[in-house]
Amino acid sequence: MTQTPATTDILSTLAGIVGDKYVLSDAAAMETYCVDWFGRFRAEGLCVVLPATTAEVSDVLAACYAAGVPVVPQGGNTSVCGASIPLGVAGAVVLCLSRMNRILALDAQGQSMTVEAGCILAKVQEAAADAGLLFPLSLSAEGTCQIGGNIATNAGGISALKYGSMRDLVIGLEVVLPDGRIWGGLKVIRKDSTGMDLKSIWIGTEGTLGVITAAVLKLFPAEGTSVDAWVGLDSPADALTLLADMRKAFGAGLTAFELMSKAQVAMVHDHVHGTRAPLESVSDWAVLMQVSAPNDGDGLVDLVETHLAAAMEAELVNDAVVARSLSQAQDFWHIRHSMSDAMKEAGMSLTHDVAVPISMVPDYIATTEKELGCRFPDAIGAVVCHLGDGNVHYNVTFPRQVWDGVDDKPGTIEEIRHLVQKTAVDQGGTFVAEHGIGRKNRAAAAEFKSPVEREIVAALRAALDPKGLMNPDTGVPA
Ligand code: FAD
């Protein structure tokens, strides 16, 4: 990007705050911060700034506010919706939290942990486990994504079935406002009825209302034992019945229930080295479920097997295998966690992240499959679904040679996205359930968020960020 006297000024001001080494303005050094995880969105920024403390974040934001320079906060940059890079914003600063990665406190008795926002999710999970506790948020990008990004997107994932999304896991927050003021809401208290729950304002706002610098997180007793099973069945409706049966049998002990279509699983076996099919028979649908117990789980494997045998007897399930070792369980989960990598390899994959009422999932999948099949018979529709939350990743992959032959590529992407999302909204659902709005879903936000909702969000943004500098071109209404 061309340097003008004004940009040189702000670069040297920022270097004065964080140190020369932590202001990257060279295109090569900025590359990884300006391209999204799928490599589909590319942006140009003025520079990347890497602060080390809340005070530095505050000074950086105050300087940018005074100079009218836009800022895009960034965590692990695993957002697959173009939310974390400065798309469509000229001369923006990418403020990356990766140096703010300390665990500040762990209260084992009070079951909470205070962390800086740049902590990688897997590090937080490990710190909890070292204390014999559990931080339950779990998703395939956990080795890269950061707690601040998880909060800013209200991340969900595999364990949301039992523990909820990030919104349910935050006790307190520290936030630097767009003008540099610090809101100190880092309290370790579980109850507070002194007015509005201010921390909620920042959860899911995708960096539009300031920078989250630290958080107090809820911890839980560690699961003593987990039993994982891979199940083959005929339809999402059968999976829904099995989910209800398993919930009845195991209650809160049911900690994961992932539904996957045959095409989605096949894509992993075709493109990810070293994965093996867990069952000899191939069914149209598979469920990967996990049942956990707080103790040594005496007899839990047998109990899960008994319930699955009854489901087979009732012809609800075609085949099932319960993992008999940790490595067998890890093999099952490796398949599940490799789905995004497999889609990257398989061709042009359009990923979606909708949610519908849980009981509507079979209908949603059938309707979407039918409509997409009519319009795009050469595309592969594939599903992976957190069934317990009604969260369906309906993904559409064009093999490379098919995609090469598509004339109107942007129009095709738009048409498919609209179809997948509108079908969900028409069924009482939402167009994005986990990944955030970002640039990718800007048109959907404009279409599907009600005018009143857009006005409320825009009013909040105007109140906290009157100059409109924080992540200005994302899809969050402004
Ligand atoms: P980024 O991508 O860096 O940023 C996301 C948004 O948050 C941006 O708008 C950014 O400006 C803002 N932001 C980041 N940090 C801060 C901060 N400190 N303060 C204010 N704003 C900030 N998501 C799920 O919910 N569930 C899943 O199961 C899931 N699976 C995934 C699997 C794969 C393979 C991949 C690549 C992604 C997956 N995601 C999933 C999406 C992604 O991992 C989540 O959205 C995650 O929460 C993003 O965290 P991040 O640190 O990478 O944030």
Image (spheres, helix red, strand yellow):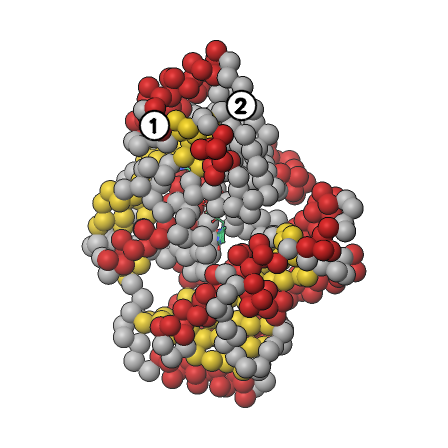
Q: Residue 173, located in which quarter of the rendered image?
A: top left
In percent of the image, x 27 and y 53: which residue is there? 127
The residue that appears at 63% across and 74% down in the rendered structure is 284
Kindly identify the residue that appears in the image at 22 percent across and 57 percent down: 131
Describe residue 399's horizontal placement relative to residue 20 as left or right: right
Of residues 203 and 141, the one nearer the viewer is 141
Q: Which residue is outermost to the top?
A: 5
Q: Residue furthest front?
A: 28
Rate crowding at label 1 as few (under 14), some (14 to 19) or many (20 or more) other CA atoms within 10 Å. few
Q: Which residue is mark 1?
A: 21
Q: Nearer the viewer, residue 201 or 305?
A: 305
Which residue is at the front of the view, 216 or 290? 290
In the drawing, does residue 141 fall left or right of residue 103?
right
Tell me how far mark 1 sits from mark 2, CA to CA: 19 Å
Which image quarter is the C terminus in? top right
Percent x, y for residue 322? 43, 79
Q: Which quarter of the picture shows residue 66? A: top left
